[in-house]
Image (spheres, rainbow, N blue to C red):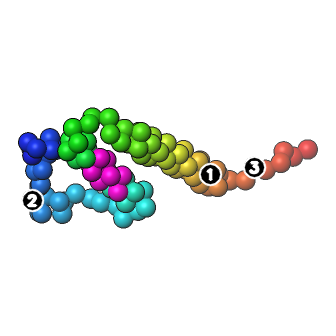
Amino acid sequence: MDRTTKISTVNPPAEALSRVPTASVPTHERLVRGFYCLKNLQLVRNHRQDPNFGKAVEERIVWRELLDLELQIVDEQIDGITSRCAKLPETVAPRD
């Protein structure tokens, strides 16, 4: 941990990172950008010695990402239901 910024600066070895699966999807990339933005906000807070600096921005980033992830889960559930319904045989009208 860097004592001046109070942020962990321990980096795992490169071979450990190669074992971590990463998705090259827009959501993953946006989460990474959001994480670095939050990390930079914390660095500025520590430098300015102002724990409230950027709190509104931080909350917007976190809530936006949480809501988006919840919407993605709902979309995946709808897609799953739709694909299962498409696999069902068509119902036959009852015979007289």
Q: Secondary structure at mark 1?
A: helix
Q: Going from the N terminus, do you reach mark 2 or mark 3 first?
A: 2
Query: Comparing marks 2 and 3, which lies closer to the viewer?
Result: 2
Q: Going from the N terminus, do you reach mark 1 or mark 2 first?
A: 2
Label 3 sits on what residue type?
A: Thr
Do tag 1 and tag 2 residues touch (Cβ < 8 Å)? no
Nearer to the camera, 67 or 35: 35
Residue 30 counted in the magenta span = no
- Marks 2/3: CA distance? 58 Å
Q: Say left or right for 47 vs 71.
A: left
Quadrant of residue 14 within the rendered picture: bottom left
Q: Residue at x 20, y 45 (%)?
A: 47
Bounds of the magenta segment? 33-41
Nearer to the camera, 18 or 2: 2
Q: Residue at x 17, y 60 (%)?
A: 17
Q: Position of residue 23 (x, y in %)?
A: 34, 61
Q: Residue furthest front?
A: 48
Residue of label 3: 91
Q: Position of residue 8 (x, y in %)?
A: 14, 45
Residue of label 2: 13
Q: Going from the N terminus, do you reach mark 3 or mark 1 first?
A: 1
Q: Residues within 10 Å of mark 1 (few under 14, many from 20)?
A: few
Nearer to the camera, 76 or 72: 72
Q: Position of residue 66 (x, y in %)?
A: 44, 42
Q: Secondary structure at mark 3?
A: loop
Q: Residue furthest top?
A: 51
Label 2 sits on what residue type?
A: Pro
Residue of label 1: 82
- Location of residue 19 with respect to 4 vertically, above or below: below
Q: For the stretch drawn in magenta, what is the main secondary structure?
A: helix
